[in-house]
Image (cartoon, rainbow, N blue to C red):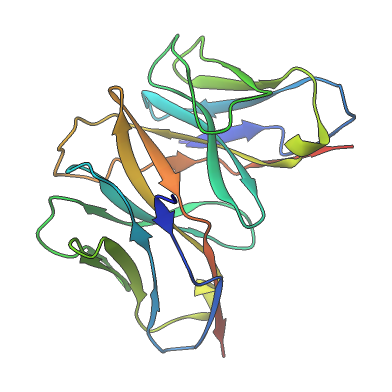
Amino acid sequence: NAGVTQTPKFRVLKTGQSMTLLCAQDMNHEYMYWYRQDPGMGLRLIHYSVGEGTTAKGEVPDGYNVSRLKKQNFLLGLESAAPSQTSVYFCASSYPEGIGRTTGAGEQFFGPGTRLTVL
Amino acid sequence: AQKITQTQPGMFVQEKEAVTLDCTYDTSDPSYGLFWYKQPSSGEMIFLIYQGSYDQQNATEGRYSLNFQKARKSANLVISASQLGDSAMYFCAMREYQGGSEKLVFGKGMKLTVNP
C-alpha cells in the first residue's frame, strides 16, 4: 500500500497563478485533511472532508478551495496564488470514530508534503 | 487562547538519557484524544503515541510513554534511552469534535537534539 501520496512534491508559482495539489490515499479512509506548515506555527488546518462529496472549512481556509469527488482523492486548489501562501502543505487521512471511542487511536496518516513557493 | 501549548522551543539531551517533552492542552469537552507526532529533518509526519481522555493508564509505545495528568491538562511525552535518530521536531496534538466531525489541533512544536 502506498498510504497517502501527494502530487507534486515541489512547485514554484508566480503571484496570481493557479494550481491544484492532489492527495490520494489507498486506505479507504473516510476523513481527509489539508494542512499548511509554516515555521514556528505548527500545522494549521485549511479544509477537511468527512466523506466523498463533502468539504468543510478549517482554521485558515481563505484563498483555497477543495474538492472530494472520489473517496480516495482530495484536491486543494489555489485560484490566485499569493506570496503568503508559500508554505509546506500536508495532506492526511483517517478513519472516523464515534465520540467516546476508547479503543484505537484513529490517528491521521500524513502524506510526504508539498513545498510551494510563490514569488 | 491556544488549545495546545508547547513551551519548550528546543531541547538538548545526551544520547541514552531520558527526556520529557512538555504539552499542555485546553478543552472543556469530556471526550478528546491526545497525540504526539515526530517530524525528522526529512519532513514526514510520524505518529508516535496516543492517549484517550478516558484511558485509565498512561500510554506506552516502545521507548515512548505519555505522562497524562488529566487534572493538570498535561500530556508530556517521555522518550527513554534517547538515540541520535530521535533528533527531530515533535508536535503535540489534540483531537476535538465539532459538528459531528473530528479534527486535530496542533501545537507549534519543539525541536529535540540528541547529542552523542
Looking at the image, residue B70 sits to the left or right of residue B20; the answer is left
Q: Going 54% across and 46% down the picture, which residue do you hit?
A: A43
Looking at the image, residue B15 sits to the left or right of residue B22; the answer is right
Q: Kindly give the residue lying farthest to the front in the view shown.
A: B1
- In percent of width and height, residue A4 lies at 51, 35
Image label count? 0
Is A6 rendered above or below residue B115? above
Instruction: Quarter of the image for the C terminus of chain A: give it.
Output: top right
Q: Going 39% across and 50% down the picture, which residue do you hit?
A: B3
Residue B20 visible in rendering: yes
- In percent of width and height, residue B97 lies at 29, 33
Residue A2 visible in rendering: no
Looking at the image, residue A59 sits to the left or right of residue A100; the answer is right
Q: Kindly give the residue lying farthest to the left in the view shown.
A: B56
Q: Could you say which quadrant of the image residue A85 lies in?
A: top right
Q: Could you say which quadrant of the image residue B100 lies in?
A: top left
Q: Going 75% across and 17% down the picture, which residue do you hit?
A: A79
Is A103 rendered above or below residue B25? above
- In percent of width and height, residue A113 lies at 63, 42
Looking at the image, residue B107 sits to the left or right of residue B64; the answer is right
Q: Could you say which quadrant of the image residue B105 lies in?
A: top left
Instruction: Quarter of the image for the N terminus of chain A: give it.
Output: top left
Is B111 rendered above or below residue B98? below
